[in-house]
Amino acid sequence: MSDQGTPQGDPQPNNWSHISETVNMLYLAVCQIETTMSEANTSVDTLTSSFTHLASHTRDVASHVQNLTDTQELGEFKQEVTQTADEIQVNISKAIEAFQFYDRVCQRVDHVARSLEKVSILLEDKSHVTEKDSWKSVQEQIKASYTMEAERIMFEYLMRGASVKEALDVYNHHFAHALEDSDGDEVELF
């Protein structure tokens, strides 16, 4: 699985079992939880840093306003306020981006919950639990719920028998490329 694209073929078409399908689905949940926790920690760190900088910049502006005494200082003050305003804008953008990651975290955790719910329902249905078509249907429903290409690719790798580490490596590779491909200038709220 050295290629970072979508996996090809079904590695063991004659060895299908509902037990291996259950294991694959549980591994999928593990991968989603791992990526969610990692991205959530990064978002919280970014939010903390951004708001700390915003508070600092706000104090600086208030201090400068209090210290103004003559018109010569006005030009310097304008320059400092402009620079501070630019830094505040950068931090606000970072904070909004972190909130967007938080939204993604919530969506992913919801995907995990819904996926586990679908697998649980199938496991409880004694008449369909061992049917390959029933498992394929659940897997297609889960795959269709993903909004990110990196998630769909991770899903494909796991369903083809990849390890959790391999699937996470593939996810991280594709997620990093998706971030590089976005221009980063547009801020979009949820």
Image: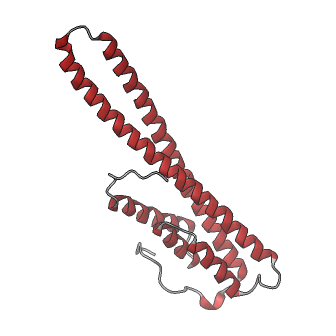
From this view, report whether residue 170 is shown above or below residue 90. Answer: below
Relative image position of residue 53 (x, y in whole percent): 40, 30
Relative image position of residue 100 (x, y in whole percent): 48, 51
From this view, report whether residue 142 is shown above or below residue 72. Answer: below
Q: Residue furthest top?
A: 69
Residue at the image position 51 percent from the left and 42 percent from the top: 44
Residue at the image position 39 percent from the left and 60 percent from the top: 176
Colour mapping used in the image: secondary structure
In the picture provided, is 111 more to the left or to the right than 104?
right
Between 156 and 77, the one nearer to me in the picture: 77
Q: Residue furthest bottom?
A: 14
In the picture provided, is 135 more to the left or to the right than 74?
right
* Number of dots carrying numbers: 0
Relative image position of residue 85 (x, y in whole percent): 31, 31
Q: Residue furthest left?
A: 72
Residue at the image position 46 percent from the left and 69 percent from the top: 149
Between 7 and 187, the one nearer to me in the picture: 187
Could you say which quadrant of the image residue 162 lies in?
bottom right
In the picture provided, is 169 more to the left or to the right than 57?
right
Relative image position of residue 70 (x, y in whole percent): 21, 9
